């Protein structure tokens, strides 16, 4: 299993529960995604987070909304 798939699946688990969480908690979860992107690309801590864009990962609030929309669609 690829590292990026493992990280994304763990962060996206139970998106419906995360609807309406405070901004500081969204920032903490976003930092997990950013750090995972830097880990995957073996970048330094203070490098730009452009690897997140190269992986085509959304920002965390959009991930929550997308997960909720997929759940409602199904």
Image (cartoon, rainbow, N blue to C red):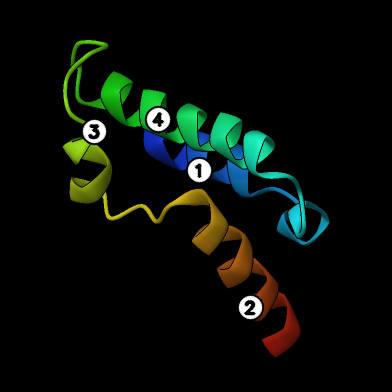
Q: Nearer the viewer, mark 3 or mark 1?
A: 3
Residue depicted at 68% across the width and 88% down the height: 73
x and y, in percent, of residue 38 in the image: 28, 24
x and y, in percent, of residue 54 in the image: 18, 48
Looking at the image, the residue that sits furthest to the bottom is 73
- C-beta proximity under 8 Å, tags 4 and 3: no
55 vs 68: above or below: above
Within-10-Å neighbours for mark 3: few <14, some 14–19, many 20+? some
Q: Is residue 59 visible?
A: yes
Distance in Å between CA atoms under marks 4 and 3: 17 Å
User: Disc 3 on helix, strand or loop?
Assistant: loop
User: Picture quarter containing residue 23?
Assistant: top right
Residue depicted at 27% across the width and 11% down the height: 45
* Image disc number at residue 49: 3
1 vs 19: above or below: above
39 vs 48: above or below: above
**Residue labelled with disc 1:** 8
């Amino acid at each position: 299993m690829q590292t990026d798939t493992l990280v994304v699946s763990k962060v996206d688990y139970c998106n419906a529960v995360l609807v309406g969480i405070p901004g500081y908690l969204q920032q903490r979860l976003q930092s997990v995604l950013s750090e995972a992107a830097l880990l995957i690309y073996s970048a330094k801590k203070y490098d730009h987070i452009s690897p997140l864009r190269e992986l085509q990962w959304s920002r965390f609030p959009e991930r929550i909304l997308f997960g909720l929309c997929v759940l409602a669609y199904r």
